[in-house]
Image: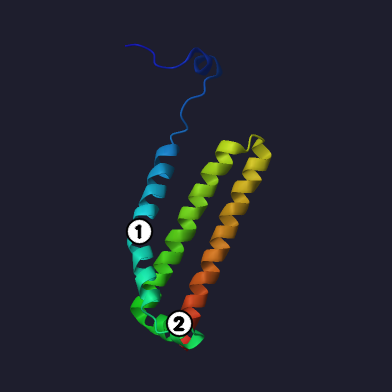
Amino acid sequence: MSNLRTPLSQVKGLGSAKEGTSHFWLQRLTAIGLIPLLLWITFAVARLPSMSQADIQAWLANPLSAILMILFLIAAFWHAKLGLQVVIEDYVSDHSVRTVAIIAVTLISFALAVVGVFSVLHIAFTG
């Protein structure tokens, strides 16, 4: 059987970390999930009588709207986090800066998703 590794990888002993495939598929799955959610939010907001605070509150008070909005927020922030992580991994060469940037993107994405979900739930339950 032929050896498919490059001479440099044989010397360094470095191979695939076996993590890129799952990251790739998660990003594709969140993108696929965002397509119907984005279509829904676009048409739902376009059908509102006005963009007043009362109309938006009444719209989010509907359980289906609140659930779909929460799904949209989770998928959007997860997708954004995955995409930003790839950009950081590709373009930041310093390992410590790259690690700090990925941690920061992860924490900020999580915090914004939590704030968004809390806001939707607050509007849905207090009307």
Left or right for 97, reference 116: right
> In the rendered structure, which amino acid carries the disc numbered 1?
Ile
In front here: 17 or 125?
Answer: 125
Q: Is residue 53 left or right of 44 when viewed as pictured? A: right
Q: Quadrant of the N terminus?
A: top left
Which of the pair 79/110 is nearer the observer?
79
Mark 1 closeness class: few <14, some 14–19, many ≥20 residues within 10 Å: few
Determine whether 12 is above or below 74 in the image. Answer: above
Amino acid type, callout 2: Ile
Residue tagged by mark 1?
35
38 lies above or below 8: below
Secondary structure of the residue carrying numbered label 1: helix
Q: Which residue is mark 2?
A: 56
Q: Earlier in the sequence, mark 1 or mark 2?
A: 1
Question: Whole-percent x and y of residue 51?
Answer: 47, 81
Q: Is residue 61 above or below residue 42?
A: below
**Mark 1 vs mark 2, CA separation in Å:** 22 Å
